[in-house]
Every structure is written in structure tokens, then in C-alpha cells.
Image (cartoon, grey):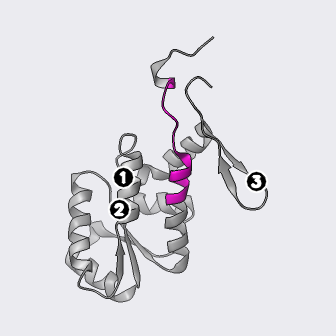
Amino acid sequence: MKNTNPSRQKKTYDLEALEELISSILEASSRGAVIIVEGRRDEMALRRLGASGPVILASRRPALDLAEDAGESYREVIVLTDWDQKGEEMARLLEKFLRHTPAVADLEIRGRLRKLVKKEIKDVESLAVYTERMRELYGKKNCGNGITRSRQIHPGG
């Protein structure tokens, strides 16, 4: 019998793209790139996903001071603010201020992540739980050599 529940009739979810973005964040973090997030829960979500490098909380300092310090102290800065109005504004300000520092500012990961998940979650703090849920729903198989492959689920099967 065919499943006619509209909530189950989703298009294929691109778990591979999500995993690629998470992997990019974790690789940069392990290289020593600093990740700027808005608050403590955002940092906790990144740690839960496996981020081991420095994380700076943007909510505790003015954007100009934060960008200057991060840009002078780190070669690579990943801006990973929420994709709500406040997060968008903060990302724009940080990008503007980071241009005047020696650091390479990465907002591409944030933009790609936002595009992929914005209909499902609105903030970085939800990212770990969301990723775990997508792995459960759409599968993630370990191939034994450290490489993981996700299976894609298509409507009806």
C-alpha cells in the first residue's frame, strides 16, 4: 500500500550536503579556525557535533571589537550566526569589519547551511539535534574505512 501521508511524501533530503557542511566546519575547527557564534548553546551544539577548535561568543562583545580581535588572532574566521534577522545583521557587520583584518572570513558555510536547513531550523543551537535526526531518518552507513555514505530516501520507498 502506497503511503499517502503528505508529511512522509517529502522529496529526497540531501543528507550528503549536510554532512559535507558539517565536515567543513569540523575540519576548519581542527585546523585552528575560530568559529563565531551568537551564544553558549550554539557553541554547545558545535561541540556536540565534534568541533574542537576555538569558538567565540558574539553576544558578549560589540561586533567591531570582536571582528578586530578575531581577525588579528586567527588566520581563518568562520561566521556561523543564526539565520534570523539578528543573526543576518550580525553576520553582515562581522563580514564588513573582518575585511579590514589579515584573517580570511568564511561566510560561505553559513550561507550554504542556511539555504539547506532554514525551513526546518532557525538557529545554530538546533543544528546538532537536527543533524542527528536527519541521520536517523535518512540513514548513514559506516563503510568501515572511516568513510560514511548516506542513503537517499525517495517518496514511496
> What residue type is disc 1 on?
Arg
The mark closer to the camera, 3 or 2, is 3
Question: Who comes first in sequence, dot 2 or dot 1?
Answer: 2
Q: Position of residue 1 (x, y in %)?
A: 63, 11
What is the spatial separation of the Cα atoms under label 2 and label 1, in whole angstroms? 17 Å
Residue 143 image label: 3
- In this rendering, does residue 36 appear at all? yes
Is disc 1 in contact with disc 3, using a CB cutoff of under 8 Å?
no
Is residue 114 positioned above or below 27 on the image? above
Which residue is drawn at the image coordinates 42% and 76% (left, top)?
Answer: 34
What is the spatial separation of the Cα atoms under label 3 and label 2, in whole angstroms? 35 Å
Which residue is drawn at the image coordinates 34% and 67% (left, top)?
Answer: 107
Give the quarter of the image for residue 93: bottom left
Q: Nearer the viewer, residue 80 or 99?
A: 99
What is the spatial separation of the Cα atoms under label 1 and label 3, in whole angstroms? 29 Å
Q: Which residue is mark 1?
A: 114
Label 1 sits on a secondary structure element that is helix
Residue 131 is inside the magenta segment: no
Q: Which residue is mark 2?
A: 39
> On the picture, is 94 further left or further right than 124?
left
> On the picture, is 141 further left or further right than 118?
right
Label 2 sits on a secondary structure element that is loop
Task: Report the span colored magenta.
Answer: 8-21
Name, please, the residue furthest toward the right: 144
